[in-house]
Image (cartoon, grey):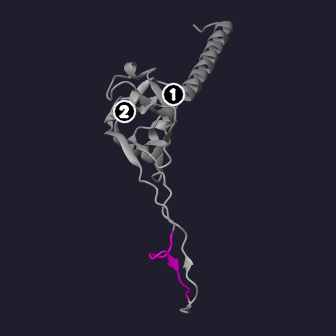
Amino acid sequence: MTAPVGQRSRRRGLWVAGGVVAAVVLVVAAVVFQPWTAFIDVTVDEEFPAATGPATGDTDGSATPDDGSVADVVPAPATTVEPAPVLEASGAFTPGTKNASGTAGVYRLADGSRVLRLEDFETSNGPDVFVVLSTAPAGAPSGEVAGTYVSLGSMKGNVGNQNYEIPADVDISAFSSVVIWCERFTESFGSAPLV
């Protein structure tokens, strides 16, 4: 015995409505979770922030004509050598909810500014991931990291060497670790102590 036409029509309508709802849920989940980012590596290879180097000139401080003739000696431009960057704190990354490796170092540059440098860095990619300084110790559970940090910006890449400017008003001594922080899921991908 077959169902009346009205019942078949209602069932079909329910299936169509269910399909539309399922499609909307899948689209929203894709936008929120961005699962494809887990399969894409973004490699960054930034140079170490350059300090002003010495000006070039002859070693005796004077310049001579190229044609070998005798001429008045012209003094070479004065040279200045900026101090090399100073490593203030550093540590090696250990995994959190994802694998993380490489090192983090806080450097004071010649002009007094500071930069966080990640070297030989590698972790998982993901949506909404930031590099943060945290008061929680390295390796702390994600729940202890939440709300205890200052963000240095979005992670530039999940592989490679990269630099993050530290704002002048940040007291680096107040922070214990560098954390790769996924804001969307409130989890630490990995962390490094600042010692």
Foreground disc of the pair 1, 2: 2
Nearest to the observer: residue 156 or residue 134: 134
Amino acid at the residue labelled 2: Gly
Amino acid at the residue labelled 1: Phe
For disc 2, the marked residue is 190
Q: Position of residue 68 (x, y in %)?
A: 53, 92
**Does residue 65 belong to the magenta stretch?**
yes
Position above or below: 130 against 42: above
Identified at 61% across, 18% down, the residue is: 21
Q: Quadrant of residue 32?
A: top right
- The reply to whether residue 47 is visible in this rendering is yes
**Does residue 60 belong to the magenta stretch?**
yes
Q: Position of residue 57 (x, y in %)?
A: 50, 73
Q: Quadrant of residue 15?
A: top right
- Residue 33's mark? 1
Position above or below: 12 against 85: above
Left or right of 192 on screen, residue 22 = right
Mark 1 falls on what kind of element?
Answer: helix
| Prevailing secondary structure of the magenta residues | loop
